[in-house]
Image: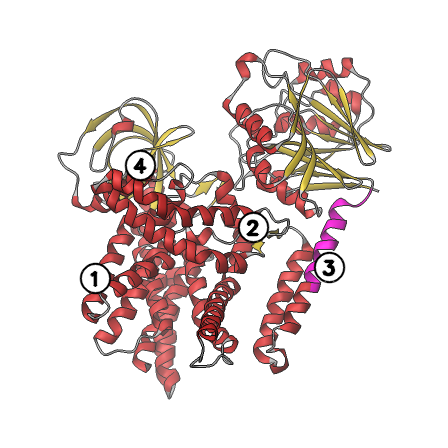
Amino acid sequence: MDRIRKLCTFAVAFSAAVFLSVYLLPMEIPVPMAAGCMLAALAGLKLRGSWRLRVILAAFGLAAGLLWTAGYDWYIVRPARQLDGRQETITVTVTGWPEEVRSGLSLPAELSLQRGPVLKLQLYASGEGYDALQPGDTVTLSARLRLANTSYGEETYTRYARGTFLIANARGTPAITPASKLPLRFYPALAARSLRESIARCFSDQTAPLISALVTGDQSGLSGPLSSALRRAGLSHTVAVSGLHVGFLAGLAATLLGRFRRRSALVSILLMVLFALMTGGSPSVVRAAVLQSLSLLAPLVNREYDPATGLSAALMLLLLWNPYAAASVGLQLSFASVAGISLLSGPLNARWTARLPAKPKTPALRLGCWLVRFCAASLSTTAGALLFTTPLTACYFGFFSLVAPLSNLLGLWAVSLSFLGGLGTALLGLIAPVAGRALALLTALPARCLIALALGLAKLPYAALPLDSPCLVLWLILVYAVALACRFVRSLYRPVIPLTACGITLCAALLSTALSAGGGTLSVAVLDVGQGESVLFSSGGRTALVDCGGSGYRDPGDVAADAIQRLGGNRLDLLVLTHCHADHSNGIPQLLSRLSVDTLLLPAALPEEDTALRQEILAAATAQGTRILLVEEDCTAVLGEAILQIFAPLGTESTNEAGLSILCTAGEFDVLVTGDMDAEIEALLTAHTALPKVELLVAGHHGSASSTSQQLLNTIRPDYAAISVGYNSYGHPRTEVLLRLADVGCQIYRTDWMGTIRFTVP
């Protein structure tokens, strides 16, 4: 074991240095710091005992990690940086199949530099010829190149973590040279595509996307409501191909070849390698394959398998391949989960099952003991994983799933059967499609159960807690403090006391959050939905939402539903759509899947504007039983102690002009929302009705220069202006709008700088 732990010490130090280099250190720092680590290793020679070797290994590990990251950055990233912002004629080799995106097609490719490395890039193109490309084809084209280190205007290494360092926007007609035959290295991707096509043929439209995600890791077919439900229920890890799926494969091989240990190990390793290649080699599946392989090989070579060493070695191998994989959220969650399971699940499971009889005497007792052990194993595994991954999910995704232990306990059997059954059905479907479709009738049942479980649990009001409230953040910190106390205080070993304390404080945190969010005569929240708009009004226990659309990291429907449930409710009294453009309404389907909505108001459609999104919204609202009103005349709605005046469309030329506008009044406080109407329609609005002095204006069209006109501002004289805006290429909010608002004495608030903006009227 001591010799094995030498590798662990070096690997942990190496990985720590890579994480430091990627996240914290400027580019010029790693090399001098590595020299300092070398000197520290020499100083370690003066130590005595076991610390001598540990210090030397740790110092050399740090130096190696720093130098490796610096060398990788110089050899790979530096050439990509030199191409940033240039218009070039390039020749690339396609490495995947085209996928439809909003701007056309997207496909992965490789660019071979004359004196340098092969750079992976993501090619975005539109036009003839691109849709027929396949791996191995060579394409010569003119493209605008940029670094793949930004998303929604913010710097991120998400694409770097996948090995993609350039984005190429193609222009003009390409010159395509088809490959004479598919290169051998693309065969695993071809196998994955064939499996996806077989799954689509065998399974129904309801279950095929989930089966495809489980078997191949392709989540592109999952609907927004299902993806959101899986996240909220704590089941999203089941469709992110990981150690769970690799374990299923290893278990299947062990079951089929149980008597032949060596053969079973070799077959399992081969299956895991093929599976990792087929699913794209994500960090989580590579980590799982390495760990499983090491655990299978250790007894065959008369070695003891050490989980800590295996985990650290797997991490080092991944970072050797690409140091920027350290920025992968999937990698961080995967390793944190396994670390938690390794450290905590075993002791928890042993404590919870310590009093069970070793040899139950009756069948009923044997069944009862088996059920208890099964529940204890599932819950201890989930608890260990959650304890280590929750800080990461809270940081990256801003929520915490309360129902995750229950959903994993109830759903893991369905995941196992869906994965193995889906894989078997897909393979059969490749050979005999009719037989595959027949078998899918049976193997789809666990998938249907899993979908029903996720959708059902996710609809619970507090299935997942959005951590945008200080009270909930403090509660989560308290949970970790209690967990730490349980580790060292023997009187807390029994779970009743800590669980009761956590439950009581959770109720207090939820109550405090609801009171702070919905207190006063009127509460107004301009939600942070990226480049879009969604405004929530709450008064007297009733809620109204004006618009629900945007283009941020999260679905605007989830953002709005979280804000409504934060108030303690699970229904929306009134939903008003100013118009049916995506940045104002693309979150409605997801919102309707999570909450019941009493009434939907939207402008009467122009014939040429009856879009697919509008039809989807109307269909979803009709299916839920929501009352739908098409506004052609001004109307009024009472919202607790507030009154909403909805002004009918005043223009007819475009969707923006034919939108609704809303005035909310609570006592002496008035709020005006004008949607995307321009200055001309704003003038019609001021002529149409006697607008009062407005305390809060939600600036029109996200701060576009064509809206929030001087005439409107002179009429309403707002005290505050909230601009709902996110990353965009339009220059919103425009400088002239900000100057106009400042000239009338407005205090300006922006969601892109401040997040969700809340106003409370006493």
Q: Which mark is residue 457?
A: 2
Q: Which residue is mark 4?
A: 201
Spatial CA span between label 1 and label 4 = 29 Å
Q: Is residue 49 above or below residue 218?
A: below
Q: Is residue 97 above or below residue 320?
A: above
| SS type, badge 3 | helix
Question: Between residues 566 and 356, which one lies in front from this camera angle?
Answer: 356
Question: Between residues 73 and 165, which one lies in front from this camera angle?
Answer: 165
Spatial CA span between label 4 and label 2 = 29 Å
* Contact, mark 1 vs mark 3 (Cβ under 8 Å): no
Instruction: Provide residue 732's location: percent of width, then percent of height.
Output: 58, 29
Q: Which residues are magenta?
A: 504-520
Which residue lies at the image location 25% right of the left edge and 31% below the top edge? Answer: 133
Spatial CA span between label 2 and label 3 = 22 Å
Type of amino acid under label 2: Leu
Q: Which residue is mark 1?
A: 267
Of labels 1 and 3, the one closer to you: 1
Q: Which residue is mark 3?
A: 508
